[in-house]
Image (cartoon, grey):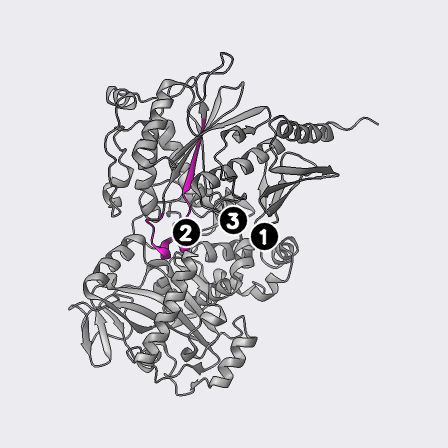
Amino acid sequence: MRMCSRQERIQKDVDVVIQRCKAENEGRFTDFRYADTTFTFMYSQGSKGISYSVNVSDDYPDNTYVSNSDNADDVLITSDPIPVIFHRIAAEMRLNNDRGESGQCRGAPGDSDGDNDSDEMYSEGECEYYGGHEENDGDEILIHPQLEADLQSVRDLKGPDAVSLREYGGFDDVEIALFVDVSFLDEETALAWGVLRREPVTIQLNCSQTQYMNGAAPKVDVYQVSKLKDRFGLGHQLKKIMQVFVTEQWQQESSEGKAACLAAPTAPSKFNFNFDPKFNSAKVVPKRNGGFLVQAIEFAEQRIPVLNEFCVICDEPHVFINGPMLRPYVCEGELCIFAFQTLGVMNKVTDVIATGAQVVDLLVSMARAALASNRRDVIFDPYPSVVDPQNPQKLAFDPKNKEYDRVIKSLENLPRIEEMTQTPHSEMKDKMDMVDKLSLPLLQWVISSNRSYIAKLPANKQLDVMQTPHQFLLLSSSPAKENIFRVAKEKYGSTFAFHGSHIENWHSILRNGLVVASNTKLQVNGAVHGSGVYISPLSTISFSYSGIYSNGQQKATSKDESTAQKNGKRFLRSRNLKCIALCEIIKSPDLHKHGDIWVAPNADHVCTRFFFIYEDGQGGDPQINTQKSETYKKILQIVTSRHQATKA
């Protein structure tokens, strides 16, 4: 019986890979097998071997799954055909070899003998990879001289590893990969943005090599090799920014640009980390002194540090009374909100719950507490902007028409987050829709509107002295604020102190920042010691501000109780929640100390680091003093271990 067209195409694509490997005597790839819906092969280097598995679907090449034995949990879902998948894997391994950075890319490391004969790759036809020049035999398409000049300019100005070029034999198309160093991002920002600091961001341009700078503008892709595209935090926003930039600049061949492209390159410019979005200085197009490709890299370097200060959809600067926050987000424009929630930009609830269910549990609890407060018109800020699932042209929850009771109802109709982790998404969605069609979209908003970074601390990274299993890493400062903090820390040094605030206030704090509330509508406890952020080295003082010891019913958790809780409790069980934050404080002359009550008038000198939750009337040890040597050392150990884990 004749095979169906789908099977024929798959078999043909498999044969392309196998035949090309045999023709080029590519011995590192072996053991090619295709059976049913799976194509497998091995990559060997010395005694090490990695097996790759490509699982195809009924709608091949769409929904093709790629995995390898070296990182079984990292599964790539792609629409590329098998030759292109193989092409990318081999190119990543060669790139690994060229850089001498074993394990940086998804593939295994390449050979170390520098054999350029293995640089032939595959697309749906033949494909060749060039890191430099290739002699022309008369039949191949000549590379555009301006492209040659631009490539060389990148190597001269940014380094030999800052660019690569792939040419497809017999085709005019080329693939240019620009590698942008992001090691300048601080650890907190990289963690919150889902970026690997040790690995460059790849900006990929697909264009014509004979019509370079004259033909159609390239298609742009942005990714980090070691991360799935849908898990790369900056992917959508930076891809859109770079596509607009490339399209606008592609054919703008000013006399200055043309001359510079073919002339000797000038010295690279240093970009300034501190851009002011009010003047859109991050959007200023760099001069084309080193050619178009250098210009593109410098524009990306210019935009990346301040992505959080611009809307992820329209790329207009945010207008925040208290300054930008840590995580990128959408602006308040209705068109942007619709696009953000309906076009797949927003993180999926299933992904977030799968990786951080306890954080979702905490976010929902904070929202409930804010809504239950008699100050909800002040502290339930921002109010949700949620697209109606039954009518995508309107908002079901609209800040212009606040319906607090309706929001409360939808939150109350949510199943327990713990239950959601144990139920398939489709089943849970159907179940939730039967009860309240707005519950799931509202949960999505609660998750995505959080502009701080929160992660549950593993048991071995927790501060035992806090006597609660509910301990979280909490980072909310923008890159600009962290930079200000870092400079001040180098000058004055820093220490740690507690900040106490009722749980109802944290829905707003996570989205608007820890601000000076003195003499504003947010003030609750007065400002007897002046205006500023109130902190204390003593837990008992900050506990009182958070309400833990306000009614005399709370009791400190014993060590035995704390150990039992840590071993057995993962999710919050109570609505009676109290909390306290541990902050890092700059020890500048501006820090006013009134006994054990400290006041920091400059909010930029206070950065949240950890967050602790207590429930059912329990409280932590009231005798904790962050300035005691033993306690201070324990805090530093946790901070240091977190930084080491981030660098790993």
Q: CA distance from mark 3 to mark 1?
A: 35 Å
Q: Which residues are magenta?
A: 183-206
Q: Answer above or below: position of 437 versus 609.
A: above
Give the image location of residue 641, x and y in percent. 40, 66
CB atoms of marks 3 and 2 within 8 Å: no
Does any portion of residue 485 appear in the rendered image? yes
Judged left or right of residue 613, residue 45 is right
Q: Is residue 196 magenta?
A: yes
Q: Position of residue 166 (x, y in %)?
A: 48, 28
Q: Is residue 251 above or below residue 487?
A: above
- Could you classify mark 1 by the number of other residues whose Cα lies within 10 Å: few (under 14), some (14-19), or many (20 or more)? few
Left or right of 164 on screen, residue 257: left
Q: Where is residue 586 shown, x and y percent of the image?
A: 23, 66
188 or 376, nearer to the observer: 188
Q: Which residue is mark 1?
A: 73
Query: Is 375 rendered above or below residue 54?
Result: below
Kind of residue indicated by mark 1:
Asp
Query: Which residue does the numbered mark 3 point to in the structure image?
Result: 388
Q: Residues within 10 Å of mark 3 (few under 14, many from 20)?
A: some
**Residue matched to label 2:** 193
Q: In the structure shown, which secondary structural element does the residue marked by tag 2 occupy?
A: helix
Q: Looking at numbered disc 2 in the image, what kind of residue is underneath it?
A: Trp
